[in-house]
Image (tube, rainbow, N blue to C red):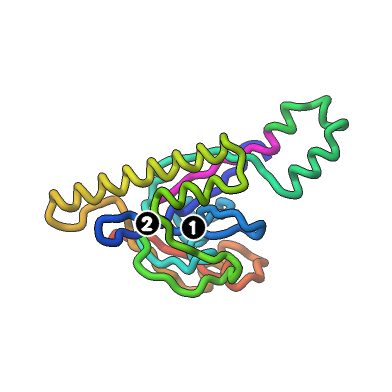
Amino acid sequence: MKGCEQVAAVCYRVRGAEIEFLLVQTRGGRWTFPKGGAEPGLTHAQAAALEAFEEAGVHGRMEETAFTRYFRRKGGSQRASLARSAARSAARPSARSAEMSVVVDAHLCEVTRLESPEDADRNPTWFSVGKAKRRLREGRKPDYAAELSRVLDRAFKRIQLMLNVSAAAGARKDALQRVHLAAPAAKKALKPGKAAKSRARVFVIDQF
């Protein structure tokens, strides 16, 4: 899986003077950003918007360009499987290491409204930046927890910068773009054979 890419939607809202972040739970109970694999036929921003909608019911404005990228290692059953086959893979440790490496492009998403997510077990929840960092640390190794904290720090600074620019201009002026759902047929054409209802949809990103 060397070179495997994923996309994440770092979703936020501004409540008074506070910036809050929206996290969802994995099936194992850990908190994370809505994320998933890069989609053939979609930009990374569109794919991130799709993940945010499916996992958290997000509608909003997405930044087309990733504000950062982070690296993670595959976990769960794959890690256990690798451990069980350690004797066989010891002869090629570099291949094993590459197989576990995943690059995640992170895109900012300003949430304008939420609806019930298609993934009913994700429990989307708002947190302050401090609480979000604590939730992201739970059940993770220190190096990966630090990586996720760095993502939040960069997101927080970028949002503050955009808010300052908008305030100075006297109007909303930023790099975020409106996201909306296109006709279901568009996604079917991009992903032939996909039966899942959510994958019959595509997000289109327009200038706000």
Q: 143 or 131, which lies in front? A: 131
Q: 86 or 46, which lies in front? A: 86
Q: Main secondary structure of the magenta part?
A: strand
The residues colored magenta run 98-109
The residue under the point 79% across, 39% down is 82
Circles 1, 2 touching at the beta carbon (< 8 Å): no
* Residue 83 point in image, percent of width and height: 80, 38
Element type at mark 2: strand
Residue 169 - label: none
The residue under the point 30% across, 55% down is 18
The residue under the point 62% across, 58% down is 29
Report the quarter where the C terminus lies. bottom left
**For the residue marked with disc 2, what is the amino acid?**
Glu
State yes or no: residue 75 in magenta: no
* Residue 91 point in image, percent of width and height: 83, 25
Residue count near mark 2 (Cα–Cα under 10 Å), binned few <14, some 14–19, many ≥20:
many
Is residue 151 rendered to the left or right of residue 140?
left
Is residue 114 rendered to the left or right of residue 166?
right
**Residue that label 1 marks:** 23
Q: Is residue 19 above or below residue 94?
A: below
Q: Is residue 40 above or below residue 1?
A: below
Q: Quadrant of residue 58?
A: bottom left
**Residue that label 2 marks:** 20
Q: Quadrant of residue 96?
A: top right
Give the distance between the C-alpha atoms of the residues marked 1 and 2, in whole angstroms: 10 Å
